[in-house]
Structure formats: C-alpha cells, structure tokens
Amino acid sequence: MKAKIISFFGFESHPETDHAEMDMRRIIGVAHYEVEYPDGSTEAIFTGLRPGENNAWNLEVIKAAQVWRSAGGVIGAWVPPTAEEIREGMQPLSARQFRLGLLDAGGTFAQVEAAIATIEDETERAKAQIEWEYAATFNRMHPLVVNLSVSLGFKPEDIDVLWARALQL
C-alpha cells in the first residue's frame, strides 16, 4: 500500500499559469498537500506540476488538486520573489569559494580583518573572527556576510553577483 493524499492545502502558481484555467492537468506550479503513509504517519509535501511531465504519483496529486479547484480553490496570481527571498534561497558557498569570490570582486583579507577589528563588543568581535577563520560554509544572509559586505563597501547586488560567480569556482 502506498501513501494517500488526505488534505490538499493549495497551489502556488508559476508565471506561465493561466489563473482562469479550471483543468488542473494544464496548470503549472507547486501543489501543497498532506499524505498519510501505511504506518499512519503524515507529512506535508510540495510537488511541482507541469503539463506533460506527470508520473503516476503526480496524476494522484492532480486528481486531488482538481477536487480542490472544483470546490472553489483559488490559484493566486504569481508574485515574483523579493530580492531578500532570492538571497535567502541562495546556495551556501564553501569557505574556499567565498574567499576566492571575495578576491575576484576586489576585496582583500586585510579589509575583512580590519572590518572585524572595528566591532566594538569584544564577544561579537571574537565570534566574527571565529566565523571568518573557521566556518566551512558561508550563507548569503548570515550576519557576518551582510555586515562585512557593508563594511567593505559592497552593495547587496554586488554580493549577489559575487555569490553567483563564486558558486562556479
């Protein structure tokens, strides 16, 4: 026995979604629903749907989505993610990628050390130094990354570019 869909919560649209379309087999986006497994456990799941790319499970999701849609479920207009949401979702960089990216963008380790040295609170300064020296990965929105970028004169958009390039290193 396989999992069964027990609740359908909604649907996040895709920019290409036709909001007037009632046939869920023609809708592009992400279905949010809950399943129950044979052992009785449940899980909330997100599944991306696109016409023509549907396996047997996706067909089950589409059936549940169709019931939800027919019962008055509304597919909201697609809203592009904000810059902050995009930044939150950026992949972490390894320490190597982060440092090489910083150098490629014109930053130096001396600038980083000088910026850390200006942190007034001794404990916060020590934490920042530990993060800089020992972190194995760096997340785009980590306070150290955000604060260092400001201290080094980078705009958020500059760091976005640095990040994208460094991911390729």
Image (cartoon, grey):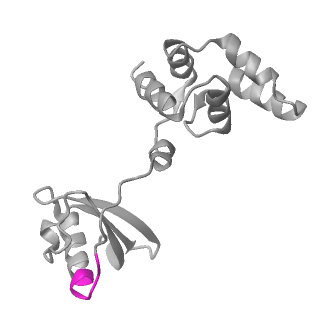
Decide: is 59 above or below 116: below
Q: Nearer the viewer, residue 55 or 126?
A: 126
Residue 98: percent from the left, percent from the top? Answer: 54, 22
| Furthest residue toward bottom | 71
On the rendered image, what quadrant is the N terminus found in?
A: bottom left
The residue lying furthest to the right in this view is 122
**Which quadrant holds residue 32?**
bottom left
**Residue at point 44%, 45% (across, down):** 86
The residue segment tinted magenta is: 67-74
Outermost residue, left side: 52
Residue 87 percent across, percent down from the top left: 49, 42
The stretch drawn in magenta includes residue 71: yes
Q: Give the residue displayed 39% in from the left and 22% down from the top.
A: 168
Q: Looking at the image, which residue is at 44% across and 73% down?
A: 39
Q: Position of residue 153 (x, y in %)?
A: 61, 24
Query: Eyeballing the image, is 92 above or below 53?
Result: above
- Viewer-closest of 119 and 97: 119
Residue sitting at x 32%, y 76%: 5
User: On the rendered image, what quadrant is the C terminus found in?
Assistant: top left
Was residue 80 drawn as part of the magenta stretch in this picture?
Answer: no
Q: In which quarter of the image is residue 102?
A: top right
* Front residue of this view, candidates 34 and 36: 34
